[in-house]
Image (cartoon, rainbow, N blue to C red):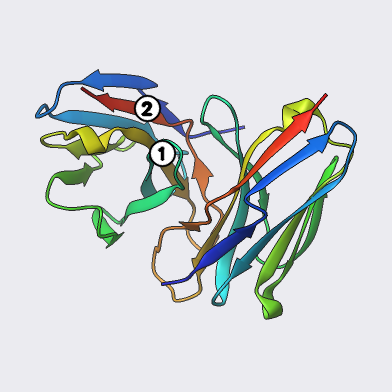
Amino acid sequence: GIQVEQSPPDLILQEGANSTLRCNFSDSVNNLQWFHQNPWGQLINLFYIPSGTKQNGRLSATTVATERYSLLYISSSQTTDSGVYFCAVEDSGGGADGLTFGKGTHLIIQP
Amino acid sequence: EPEVTQTPSHQVTQMGQEVILRCVPISNHLYFYWYRQILGQKVEFLVSFYNNEISEKSEIFDDQFSVERPDGSNFTLKIRSTKLEDSAMYFCASRIPYAYEQYFGPGTRLTVT
């Protein structure tokens, strides 16, 4: 099945810093989503981005499908950005395959 | 904005008991999914469901698990005889046909004692 690797596994930054999270995947995809898991365990959908670039406030994401990677940018980090960020993909084989998640990047923003 | 809902938010059960986790997908969605996340680990796909039957399932989804759409709104996951290792957060998700973005519910935290 498709493989998903996220880096870095852990990231500690000061408030106000910028960060870049990376997701590499091993095959062509129909779907790529970025999630933020909050302290209560909920998965907050940040972006649906199988290709191209999107922005939402301080967050933006870029997926280069031909090179099989995606980047999530967080600018001017706030303590509320802390948590685990997951990349998840669905390969383009058709059907109703589930998403394959990476292991996540654990982001800690210090005041 | 419509959203996926799940009940209960937290369930505690004894080993060997049956549990049913409930989900209400977004009303015009036709594909439904269950995922689980053991504490501290990544989210894992369990099963997908379309047109009143299972579309895909993972190795985790063994005979102890079953899914059902008992009416026009609910989608359930049943675990017949719970084990300690079934303790996890269970997420339901749904999507419309011809669009791949999945919408996730808030999860049910299952604790087996």
**Residue plotted at (15% across, 21% down):** B14
Q: Percent from the top left, x then y, of residue B70?
A: 22, 37
Residue found at x 18% / y 37%: B79
Q: Is residue A58 left or right of residue B6?
A: right
Chain letter behind tag 2: B
Q: Is residue B63 left or right of residue A29?
A: left
Provide the residue designation for mark 2: B109
The alpha-carbon separation of the residues under discs 2 and 1 comes to: 9 Å
Relative to B75, B80 lies left or right: left
* Residue A85 placement (x, y as % from top left): 63, 44
Marks 2 and 1: which is nearer the front?
A: 2
Q: Residue A4: tell me if it is visible.
A: yes
Identity, as a three-letter code, of the amino acid under mark 2: Arg
Query: What chain does badge 1 belong to?
Result: B
Figure disc tally:
2
Mark 2 residue element? strand
SS assignment at label 1: strand
* Kind of residue indicated by mark 1: Phe
Q: Is residue B31 in sight in this rendering?
A: no
Picture residue at 62% right of the left edge, 32% below the top = B1
Q: Above or below — where is B17 with respect to A100?
A: above
Badge 1 is on which residue?
Answer: B91
Horizontal and vertical percent for residue A70? 70, 64
Q: Quadrant of residue A24?
A: bottom right
The numbered dot on residue A28 is: none
